[in-house]
């Protein structure tokens, strides 16, 4: 793990925001951002605009709506899927895509076994780098601490509760539909390598059960939907969610 250093990170995902595009103010943003991290499902033009006007590195992973990136990646930006990079003293690694629900790997959709293989290949690079400070992904990690024993695991269409597990939240943070479910292999990576941060997208904050910030073990998990400013010198505030699960989700 690298020595702690301050980085001001603009994390973005899923939807372009007027404040960062149509109403962009260079004076407001340029002095506040050292690095941009995209968690996927954003247009090529949006990423190219931000990397140009902010004049800082932009790293990204592709989401399930970024199929065009395979033939036409955003210019000036770095795809970090399956890679480990050191930026400004931070060791950052990335994993693209989400769980498979209606397509295959060419559309950045993977089975759990395929995701586990992606994680396995990345872990060797993480080991060689001496650890990882920040993970970037499109899909979220599984939060449920009893996933293996869960009678209604994430992605089954039902919500799990575990009264026998004190660390389980009253409102489950895992999606109940196959498209938005978290990745079990991501959770295992967190428990093995303990990154300080895990940034993801895919699960919109407009879904009733989705928090902006949560924790898995000692890792702060941040949903970058829209945008989120992360200052690594300031510990993010984690709020317990009181949201009731929603069953009206559709793939997005």
Image (spheres, rainbow, N blue to C red):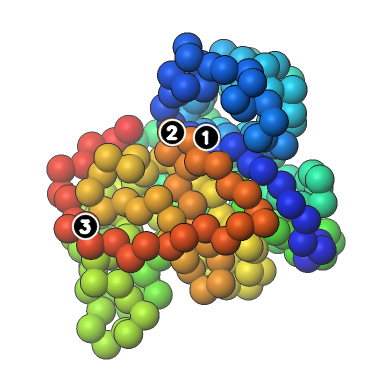
Left or right of 227: which side holds 131?
A: right
* Picture quarter with the N terminus: bottom right
Secondary structure of the residue carrying tag 2 is: strand
| Residue at point 43%, 38% (across, down) | 225
Evaluate whether residue 70 shows in this view. Answer: no
Evaluate whether residue 45 shows in this view. Answer: yes
Residue 223 at x, y percent in the picture: 45, 47
Q: Label 3 crowding class (10 Å Cα cut-off): few <14, some 14-19, many 20+? A: some
Q: Label 1 crowding class (10 Å Cα cut-off): few <14, some 14-19, many 20+? A: many
Q: Which residue is mark 2?
A: 226
User: Reading the chain from its start, which is encountered first: label 1 or label 3?
Assistant: 1
Depth check: 121 or 250 in front?
250
| Residue at point 63%, 49% (across, down) | 231
Depth check: 244 or 43 in front?
244
Q: Residue furthest front?
A: 27
Q: Which residue is mark 3?
A: 243
| Residue at point 17%, 50% (across, down) | 246
| Residue at point 17%, 58% (across, down) | 244
Q: CA distance from mark 2 to mark 3?
A: 20 Å
Looking at the image, residue 158 lies above or below residue 25: below
Asked if marks 1 and 3 touch (Cβ < 8 Å), the reply is no
Looking at the image, residue 61 lies above or below residue 242: above
Residue 56 at x, y percent in the picture: 74, 28
Q: Which residue is mark 1?
A: 12
Q: Quadrant of residue 183?
A: bottom left
Asked if marks 1 and 2 touch (Cβ < 8 Å), the reply is yes
Left or right of 76: which side holds 142?
A: left
Residue 63 at x, y percent in the picture: 49, 34
Q: CA distance from mark 1 to mark 2?
A: 6 Å
* Picture quarter with the C terminus: top left
């Amino acid at each position: 793990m690298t020595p702690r250093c301050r980085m001001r990170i603009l994390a973005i995902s899923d939807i372009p925001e007027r404040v960062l595009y149509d109403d962009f103010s260079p004076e407001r943003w340029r002095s506040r951002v050292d690095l941009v991290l995209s968690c996927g499902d954003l247009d090529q033009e949006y990423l190219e605009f931000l990397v140009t006007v902010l004049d800082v590195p932009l790293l990204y992973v592709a989401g399930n709506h970024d199929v065009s990136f395979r033939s036409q990646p955003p210019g000036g930006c770095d795809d970090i899927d399956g890679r480990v990079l050191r930026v400004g003293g931070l060791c950052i690694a990335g994993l693209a895509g989400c769980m498979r629900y209606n397509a295959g790997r060419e559309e950045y959709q993977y089975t759990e076994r395929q995701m586990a293989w992606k994680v396995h290949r990345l872990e060797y690079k993480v080991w060689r780098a001496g650890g990882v400070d920040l993970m970037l992904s499109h899909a979220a990690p599984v939060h449920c601490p009893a996933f293996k024993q869960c009678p209604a695991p994430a992605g089954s269409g039902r919500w799990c509760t575990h009264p026998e597990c004190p660390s389980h939240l009253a409102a489950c943070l895992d999606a109940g539909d196959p498209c938005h479910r978290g990745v079990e292999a991501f959770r295992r990576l967190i428990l093995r390598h303990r990154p300080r941060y895990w940034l993801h997208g895919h699960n919109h904050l407009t879904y009733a059960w989705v928090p902006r910030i949560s924790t898995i073990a000692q890792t702060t998990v941040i949903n970058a939907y829209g945008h989120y400013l992360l200052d690594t010198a300031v510990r993010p505030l984690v709020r317990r969610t009181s949201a009731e699960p929603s069953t009206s989700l559709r793939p997005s």
